[in-house]
Image: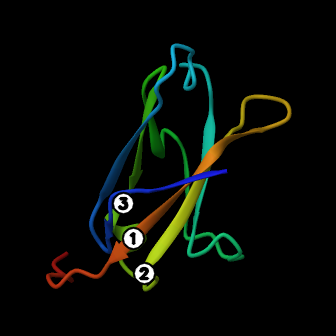
Amino acid sequence: MAETKGSPIIAGYVWNQVVAVKTPSAVFPSDATFTAHVRATVDASTTLATLTVGSGITRLSDQSIQLTIAGATSVDWTATSVVLDLVRTDTTPDQHMGWRLKIPVVQPVTRGLS
């Protein structure tokens, strides 16, 4: 499975990451649904966040999506990184997309503003 690094999550602040693939085929078709679990490690039993289409996953095109984690979701994260992967859920069986993001988590100096 391919693992790549995402842009850092600043704990307590909104995080956005565009995931794009270079292929002529529709990897993210308009009628598809996806789910991603965010965990401190691959082996962690606790899910820190669940992203779904319309709630953290936004389709941009047939080849790209945007992942978003709200600041309120990550405000108490103490891990130095988190992992997530993506599963297409409108197929039978569900289809793992074959990649995983390892995302650094950074504690901000300026925090507790809202």
Find disc 3 in the rendering and name its residue: 70
Query: Residue 80 has which mark?
Result: 2
- Taking depth in this image into account, of 42 and 112 the one nearest to the observer is 42
Amino acid type, mark 3: Ala
Mark 2 residue element? loop
Q: Residue at x 61, y 38 (%)?
A: 34
Q: In x, y percent, where is residue 12?
A: 30, 73
Between marks 2 and 1, how big is the CA–CA gap? 6 Å
Q: What is the crowding at mark 1: few (fewer than 14 residues within 10 Å), some, or many (at least 20)?
A: some
- Taking depth in this image into account, of 110 and 96 the one nearest to the observer is 96
Q: Indicate the quadrant where residue 15 lies.
A: bottom left
Q: Earlier in the sequence, mark 3 or mark 1?
A: 3
Q: Earlier in the sequence, mark 2 or mark 3?
A: 3
Mark 1 residue element? strand
Q: What is the crowding at mark 2: few (fewer than 14 residues within 10 Å), some, or many (at least 20)?
A: few
Mark 2 and mark 1 residues within 8 Å of each other at the beta carbon: yes
Amino acid type, mark 1: Pro
Mark 3 residue element? loop
Check the image and report above or below for 55 versus 21: below
Q: What is the crowding at mark 3: few (fewer than 14 residues within 10 Å), some, or many (at least 20)?
A: some
Find disc 1 in the rendering and name its residue: 104
User: Colour mode?
Assistant: rainbow
Between marks 3 and 1, how big is the CA–CA gap? 16 Å
Front position among marks 2 and 3: 2
Q: Indicate the quadrant where residue 109 lies.
A: bottom left
Q: In x, y percent, where is residue 16?
A: 33, 51
Q: Earlier in the sequence, mark 2 or mark 1?
A: 2
Between marks 2 and 3, how big is the CA–CA gap? 17 Å
